[in-house]
Amino acid sequence: MVVFREMSRTSPQNKRFIGWKGLRRGHTARPLEWLVEKGIFVVSLSTIVLIFLIFLFTALEALPVFLGNTNNSLVQKTIPVEAMDRLTPKQLREYLGLTEKEFAGMPRETLKSLMEVKIETASEAPNDKDAALDTTSWRYLLLPYQWTGYDKSEYIWQPVSQIQKYNIVPLLIGSLKTTLVALLFSVPLALGAAIYVSQLSKPRVREYLKPAVELLAGIPSVVLGFFALMVMATLLQKAFGYQSRLNTFVAGIALGLAVIPVVFSIAEDALTSVPRSYTHAALALGSSRWQAAWQIVLPAAIPGVFAAVMLGFGRAIGETMVVLMASGNASILSWNLFDSTRTMTATIAAELAETVTHGHHYRILFMLGTLLFLVTFVANLVADVVIHRLKHKLEGK
Amino acid sequence: MIKGVQTSARRSEQAQTRALAFHTAKFDLTSFFFTGLTGLATLIILATLITILGNVLWHGWEGLSWRFISSSAKKDMFDVEKAGVLPMIVGTSARVILMTIFVIPVGVITAIYLTEYAHATSLFPRVIRGAISNLAGVPSIVFGLFGLGFFVNFVGQKMDTLLHAENAGLVWGQPALIWASLTLAIMTLPVVIVATEESLKAIPVGLREASLALGATKLETIVQIVLPQALPGILTGGILAISRAAGEVAPILFTGAAYYMADLPKSLTDQFMDLGYHVFVLSTQSPNIDQTRPILFATVVVLLLLTFALNIIAILVRANMRKKMRAVS
């Protein structure tokens, strides 16, 4: 009786909160179960935490570059060794570029010799107007500059040289160029296939076609890169007769193969989610299957198609192994599709292993990674919102 | 009885064909042309897929032998006669199995929260879903950077200062098997969550209600009734995650893959050789690309067999599950 009264008093609002003592609904106390259910909730938050951590740790490594706190100029102000005692420990530590832990464990003699080394490197600095530049500042990352030995201002990415040149514009254009080729190649094919499979093919054939096309997603990107490098590059060169064997065009086509399953799968889902009654109505009014698909179903699903292209873009700009193997990896600034090129992803993959941890080069590569993260994050977010709205509209909520 | 069913089926088929004949009586050239065009697009995609697989298998088959699979190249990995892929198979398997151990529990628990506990209208599940689809879209190289910045340089070095303060050498704070597996686990988390969710949704609500009506609590229902039913779906998720992770190279470039190692990995902190990375090394850093071509194609075949076999198993399990689901509803 008591239990019954307890239950009838429970409003729907607090139905969920049974509480660890289980009293509210006349339940027997099950603190362990309550604990496990809270645990499930906490674990399910891990994806949010992970996205946040990924951004934090790539951006954190790149933070000094964003703030302009790195300085890699070869000519720096030096302090004579005799002046060592006049400096405060903090000044000395910053001058030598040591962390607090390293500084604390260092005997006086070592500090002295470090200062001597510093003076020596300064005296050995090249006699060049560019040697005094901080090439990691934003001006040199984004704008062209006339380096010694060049006839005009140029955008140059050349991190392994005496004066490191970190202009990221060639890499940005390389990435965009390759992505553009990939999308131009893959989107028409994938959309055509999506329309055919979802609207025009016979139901019995469709059951086999969809998994077959999606099997393309099962090919690892390193295998696509390998195939582009060993087989496609030679074939395409023979067919079009251009100069360099590995170039944007080859990389873009191979990248397109990686993008096709993404675009196909999302677009096909969007087209299938359009109610069949739309098609039936069109057919009943005397249109052909193609007219129904093109004039009725496609316009209804167009946000989904847009989302598919957005996700395809995100996949293409973030893909690494294909472009690393098939693009030729020369950081030349040009819009020519038949020149070798180098993308942001390929640059990170090729160069990070050889950098000094927490050095300038390392930090600039992490900055490229942060840019990639932000670009794909926005692309995904837009696609996600669009798909969500489309589903609501079609389900009539 | 059976005969009656057959005749009625035939009759409806006839009605359909008659309806179709009536419908297609009017021939429209534009429609015919565009239907052909979209069909052609499908055909081109399938032909490309078959060309890639056929070409690789055709060239790789001759280099493939039991000796190639079961031996390790102690001296020279570019030597066609002596090279073997055993260390790479062991390395790839090890990182993938470890990854499964990390990713399955987290993925399944998240899926349980989303389908069984979360209210569709509240804030958390919506944010979690957004995070999942974003996680699926993060470029693989960014996962590699994250693995290096977080696991190797942050967690690993913190562990070194805590556990091995006395010796100066790095134990955890360097690329290692465990860091590569953890990085891949984060990357494949969305795959597992989505597959598990799909299978949880396919279980009829009546089953849960029956269990609750018999006096079981919600958690008991989930553990004893729902999860056993969802097992095939969880399995599919695991297999898809493995097949996705087995071929990934970018996330492990800086977190554990080694160019060459004389021995097999023995502990979690060892580096390892990897099939995908080995394909990359063989095709870009070989001293004589024409000479090493047979072992390169053979390595690709081994990698493809590994990932494709898993993929096809997942597709079959999933198709079977969908059929059952349709039968129930």
Image (cartoon, coloured by chain):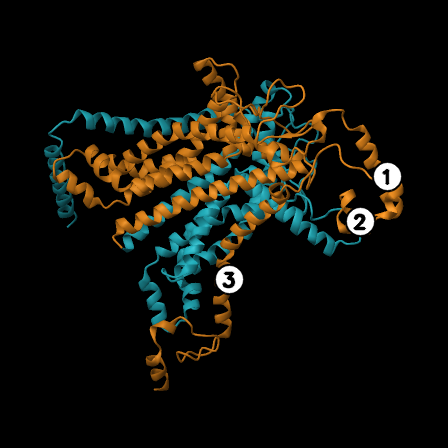
Q: Which chain is orange?
A: A
- Which quadrant would the N terminus of chain A be assigned to in this image? bottom left
Image position of B68 (left or right of A4): right
Residue at mark 1 shares a chain with residue at mark 2: yes
- Judge by depth and name the residue closer to the eye, B118 or A151: A151
Residue depth check, mark 1 versus mark 2: number of the one nearer the observer: 1
Could you tell me how far apart the alpha carbons at marks 1 and 2 are, in whole angstroms?
A: 19 Å
Residue depth check, mark 2 versus mark 3: number of the one nearer the observer: 2
Q: Residue at x 32, y 30 (%)?
A: B42
Residue B35: horizontal and vertical position, in percent?
24, 29
- Judge by depth and name the residue closer to the eye, A336 or A185: A336
**Mark 3, other Cα within 10 Å: few <14 / some 14–19 / many ≥20:** few
Q: Residue at x 12, y 33 (%)?
A: B21
Mark seen at residue A91: none
Q: Are marks 2 and 3 in contact (CB under 8 Å)?
A: no
Residue hosting label 3: A42
Chain ID, mark 1: A
Residue B243: horizontal and vertical position, in percent?
49, 41
Q: Earlier in the sequence, mark 2 or mark 3?
A: 3
Q: Chain B appears what colour?
A: cyan
Residue A30: horizontal and vertical position, in percent?
48, 75
Residue hosting label 2: A103
